[in-house]
């Protein structure tokens, strides 16, 4: 067995702390705790809590500068379902931060970005969970009536402002978000009929187009030129799930 160099040990230590939310997340194992202790000794880290706090602060500071497109697409995974009541793909994005309010302040731009992303990726539904890695609590951005129906069936949390659900102390997509959605869908959940239409009936080009910010040294991508801006429409409350054609397609094709 080879002993990692100090710098490598430090990077591995930070990776485990990030992935396990400083050993507080539900995916944390005894092996994680053991490796943190070993790596901290090799890396000469005497205060693991301070390291984790500074790491999370740095990550959250960077997130605050990201575009809506980057936040929605940065840590997004899709899951395919072929159940009796629902066939299609569901996207689930996660943003981990020490300050949820900074991300939630972008809601009016995140919602239409979610609608555009659904169309581009041909998803049936798309969720965005904002995980507070200090309080170990989460909120779920809901971009339409279809998402609202499924989220209520799965999580049953209180909804505020028409698009934000309190997920309580759930923080893990792998162990606490997707398994619950999967169970509800496999138990026969169906999209309710006669749901109001919303942003999903909007043509993709009306959401604008993606551009690289030439002034950003990191090449930030933002959606610009949306015809929905300054129209007076309550954007944050009017994103529905896929339009009628897409709904029919998701029910007739296996994912």
Image (spheres, rainbow, N blue to C red):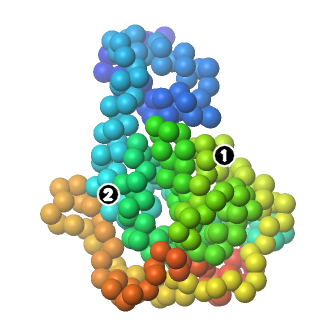
Whole-number angstrom distance, CA of label 1 to CA of label 2: 26 Å
- Residue at screen point 55% across, 88% down: 201
Toward which corner of the image does residue 29 lie, by quadrant?
A: top right
**Image side of residue 148 versus residue 186, left or right:** left
Q: Secondary structure at mark 2?
A: loop
In-front residue for pair 26/82: 26
Is residue 170 rendered to the left or right of residue 23? Answer: right
> Looking at the image, is 4 positioned above or below residue 93?
above
Q: Is residue 209 visible?
A: yes
Q: Nearer the viewer, residue 220 or 236?
A: 236
* Horizontal side, residue 147 vs residue 186: left or right: left
Would you place residue 76 above or below residue 11 in this image?
below
- Disc number at residue 176? 1
x, y (%) of residue 121? 52, 71
* Disc 2: which residue: 66
Task: Mark yes or no: residue 121 visible.
Answer: no
Residue drawn at x 59%, y 74% is 144
Q: Residue 140, percent across and down? A: 56, 58
Q: Quadrant of the C terminus?
A: bottom right
Residue 12, image x, y percentages? 42, 26
Tell me: 121 left or right of 243.
Answer: left
Q: Position of residue 143 (x, y in %)?
A: 55, 71
| Residue 10 vertical position relative to residue 133 in the rendered view, above or below | above
Residue at 47% over, 74% down: 236
Residue farthest to the left, as pictured:
215
SS under mark 1: helix
In the depicted view, which residue is nearer to us: 46 or 215?
A: 46
Task: Give the number of the disc on residue 130.
Answer: none
Q: Residues within 10 Å of mark 2 (few under 14, many from 20)?
A: some
Viewer-closest of 190 and 234: 234
Between disc 1 and disc 2, whose residue precedes?
2
């Amino acid at each position: 067995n080879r002993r990692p160099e100090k710098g490598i040990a430090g990077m591995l230590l930070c990776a485990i702390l990030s992935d396990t939310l400083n050993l507080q997340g539900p995916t944390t194992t005894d092996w994680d705790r053991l490796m943190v202790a070993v790596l901290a000794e090799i890396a000469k880290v005497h205060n693991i809590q301070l390291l984790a706090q500074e790491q999370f602060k740095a990550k959250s500071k960077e997130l605050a500068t990201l575009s809506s497109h980057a936040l929605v697409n940065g840590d997004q995974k899709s899951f395919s379902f072929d159940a009796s009541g629902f066939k299609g793909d569901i996207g689930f994005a996660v943003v981990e931060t020490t300050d949820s309010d900074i991300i939630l302040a972008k809601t009016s731009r995140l919602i239409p970005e979610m609608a555009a992303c659904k169309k581009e990726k041909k998803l049936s539904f798309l969720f965005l969970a904002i995980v507070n890695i200090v309080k170990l609590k989460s909120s779920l951005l809901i971009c339409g009536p279809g998402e609202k129906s499924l989220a209520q069936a799965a999580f049953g949390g209180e909804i505020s402002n028409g698009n934000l659900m309190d997920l309580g102390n759930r923080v893990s997509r792998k162990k606490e978000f997707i398994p619950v959605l999967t169970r509800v869908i496999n138990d026969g959940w169906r999209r309710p009929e006669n749901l109001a239409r919303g942003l999903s009936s909007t043509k993709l080009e009306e959401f604008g187009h993606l551009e690289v910010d030439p002034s950003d040294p990191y090449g930030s991508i933002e959606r610009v030129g949306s015809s929905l801006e300054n129209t007076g429409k309550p954007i944050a409350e009017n994103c529905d799930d896929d339009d009628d054609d897409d709904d029919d397609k998701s029910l007739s094709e296996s994912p």
